[in-house]
Amino acid sequence: MKRRDFLKSVSGLAAGAALPAAPQVISSAYADARSETLLIVSEGGPNNLDIHGVGTNVPGYEVSWNCYDRLISHEMKTGPGGVPYYDRDKFKPELAEEFKIDDMSVTFKLKKNAKFHDGTPVTAKDVKWSLDRAVSVGGFPTFQMSAGSLTKPEQFVVIDDHTVRVDFLKKDRLTVPDLAVIVPCIVNSELVKKNANEKDPWGLEFTKQQTAGSGAYKVTKWTAGTEVIMERNEDWVGGPLPKIKRVIWRMVPQAGNRRALLERGDADISYELPNKDFQEMKASGKLNVVSLPFSNGIQYIGMNVTKPPFDNPKVRQAVAYALPYQKIMDAVMFGLANPMFGAAKDKPTEVAWPQPHKYNTDMDKAKALMAEAGQAGGFETTISFDLNFAGVNEPLCVLVQESLAQIGIKTTINKVPGANWRTELNKKEMPLFTNVFSGWLDYPEYFFYWCYHGNNSVFNTMSYKSAEMDKLIDGARTAAATGDMATYDTDVKGFVDLAYTDIPRIPLYQPFVNVAMQKNISGYQYWFHRRLDYRAMAKG
Amino acid sequence: MLTMIGKRLMFAIPSLIGVVIVTFLLTRALPGDPAAYFAGPAATKEAVEQIRKKLGLDKPLIEQFFRYTNDLAHGDFGNSLTTGQPVAAEIRNRLPASAELTLLGLIVSIVIAIPLGVLAATRPGSWIDHVCRITTTAGVSLPVFFTGLVLVYFFYFRLGWSPAPLGRLDVFYSAPPTVTGFYLIDTLIARDFEAFRSALSQLILPATTLAIFSLAPIARMTRASMLAVLSSEFVRTARASGLPPATVIVTYAFRNAMLPVITTLSMVFSFLLGANVLVEKVFAWPGIGSYAVEALISSDFAPVQGFVLTMAVMYVLLNLVIDILYGVIDPRVRLEG
């Protein structure tokens, strides 16, 4: 730096210090910006702005949901506590103007005035390209599409510029709902193709860094691990223009600080806080805390049924009678969960999932069952959990360890680092563990297909196999597709009953999604993906 | 001098090669399967395999290594999977954030610790010596995240004096155009004094946290080395010759006592740069420490390797600077290869 420049900058500094009155002008602009801006704080942020990308994480889904449109979406209904809750059975057009479901296909007419963020109109070929992309890129998106029997590009047919038909592979009740999840989002095909190359034919590298959709918001700045800034798309036609102009989403790793930011009124919304904090904030009443049960989700204790001693149903039942259910509800969840245990003896099984089982903490029964199984002396085993969710899992496992010791089962706790958890689950070697599963599509047969079916998916963490169970699950799926509701009901009741007598996994509770927000924030909606939908929110 | 520096840098090359090999092997030895992790919660075995292929992790280790070194030679550190960004760019963006915070913390610490150490040494056993001992012991015994949280609790949550611990700038200010990457300097260059104030006020608490932690080694080292110098013969001679005490202490004693202090400073600096992860976490600071730790937790190889390599280079450079400083402070020290 030259001496003259140095002097200049020093005098500049002095001038800055001498002008304390200047900020006032800036402050009123600042207040305006605040009232139209939503400031969200959370622990983690997205690693990819495109849900079709390799290894896109859950926060990335939130960006996709708000920045891309789908052909259809769900209507809202009033959920528990009067909070708007997505309606599983009612669909509304989003990018489509109307849609018609026929016997073996569904036809969508696109809105003619829909435009991508760069101004190009949304056409049928964009829709086809996007759906082709979802079923072809592999990994999670392709897997999710296949859950609704959407697997082949040939299923998506362009009829004219504004009409697309989706052909069904087979009758499957989940096909239409699967078109309303996050994955089948419509991407600006021309823009992405321009930025694709032979190594990356679907342009995943491009959409990782920027949003190329037609959604209500667009990402204007993204600093990975630090912040995401989204601005409203003024030309959005997917629904009424959102009230929030700008969304600033900051990553604040410390839970205590997130709470402090909320309580001081500096942040508008946060989730991912410890249950205890949520419970305290609820009690203090300064903030609005919404707690809603995970749809189709359960935290459970699983047992590997392929290995002794858990291959013996009597041992599994003994464990089910020995678990400290109520203690877990009180000391770990602070009441923020729906109990999934202790249903009345004479309560009939419902055609619903999740529903509570009839086991309760009963040490005498547990000991008797252990004796019947020839395990009166007890045994040693390990109980594993995912360290990423240590806040809940660790105290839970300690309580389970304590209780199981009373019936002679000595457990060592095995803490598995988050990066390793999937690998361990895939190996299917852990004898005893706790985990959560929750399905986007809220249907009992969907849950059971992934968690109990003999085709042994990753989520059948117990390696449970039963011909009878498979028959019931397959039966329910076929019955649902053909609309044979009587068979469907018996099959659902059948597999729930079987799951509870064989008890390879013991449901503990249905966890809650907790979101804390300032009192002046309105319009929170619960979605199956459990992330925020900014489009309905308002401030002030 | 220049040839000496060149020679020193040459000697650093083997250690850097060693670092490259060791970090590569260590990251591969980590438990956990990145492919399974990034395939997501709902992945089938085939999906995991597809991801593994995409990441190039199905290739033999030696091939992966050659690809990695080849990329390195072209200045490509690879891509982070957790943040989705090129590692080199991320480190370039995040290093200044850490460096600015660490430097400021260190400056605060030096401003307090060195006078404190000098005073304690000139009056051993006095109250100032005890103050020095107590503050340094307290500072080093409190874990940094604890000090950080306590400061946030009082100055932000209770008193409201400090801005929200939301990183380098208030949410509603935009970052200045990057020149040095140091917001305090860049905002001045851009003449954006509002942003400068915001950046400075965001820095105060985390820098203080770091300063409290690093007081101890600097103050203790200053005290010890001053005590040794003050009892030496040339100081006695100076005193006997009737030089004023200030001259004796500052000009003669302190200059001679500085060498070990400088060494400590370099160690403290490099230690803080890597180890302020916790401070970065508490203050949502977008630095490299938290970046590396997050990468480690998710078995994300590239950033971990990039981080270790950057730190190794920093150490080499820092050591070189310190050696040059030795020569400046004490002309008797010669820079040898």
Image (cartoon, rainbow, N blue to C red):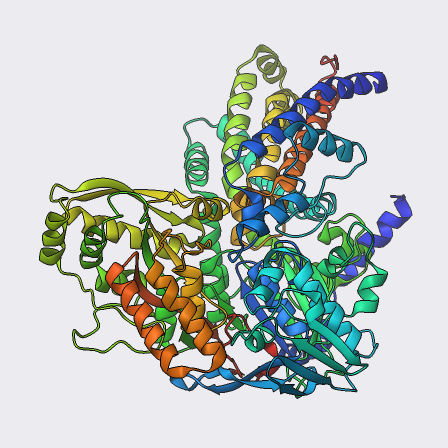
Query: Could you say where residue B253 lies in the image, as x and y percent from the top left?
Result: 61, 21
- Against A411, residue B217 (above or below) is above
Front-most of residues A446 and B106:
A446
Query: Could you say where residue B159 lies in the image, as x and y percent from the top left?
Result: 47, 65
- Identified at 27% across, 48% down, the residue is A311
In the picture, measured across the screen, residue A131 lies left or right of residue A261, that is right
- When asked about the image quadrant of residue A317, the answer is bottom left
Front-most of residues B324 and B229:
B324
- Against B146, residue A325 (above or below) is below
Query: Could you say where residue A520 lies in the image, as x and y percent from the top left?
Result: 52, 83
- When asked about the image quadrant of residue A228, the answer is bottom right
- Identified at 68% across, 33% down, the residue is B64
- When asked about the image quadrant of residue B321, the answer is top right
Can residue A531 be seen here? The reply is yes
- Against A283, residue B180 (above or below) is above
Front-most of residues B239 and B250:
B250
For this orientation, the residue located farthest to the top is B233
- Identified at 74% across, 21% down, the residue is B13
- Identified at 52% across, 32% down, the residue is B219
Can residue B110 be seen here? The reply is no
State which quarter of the image contains the N terminus of chain A: top right
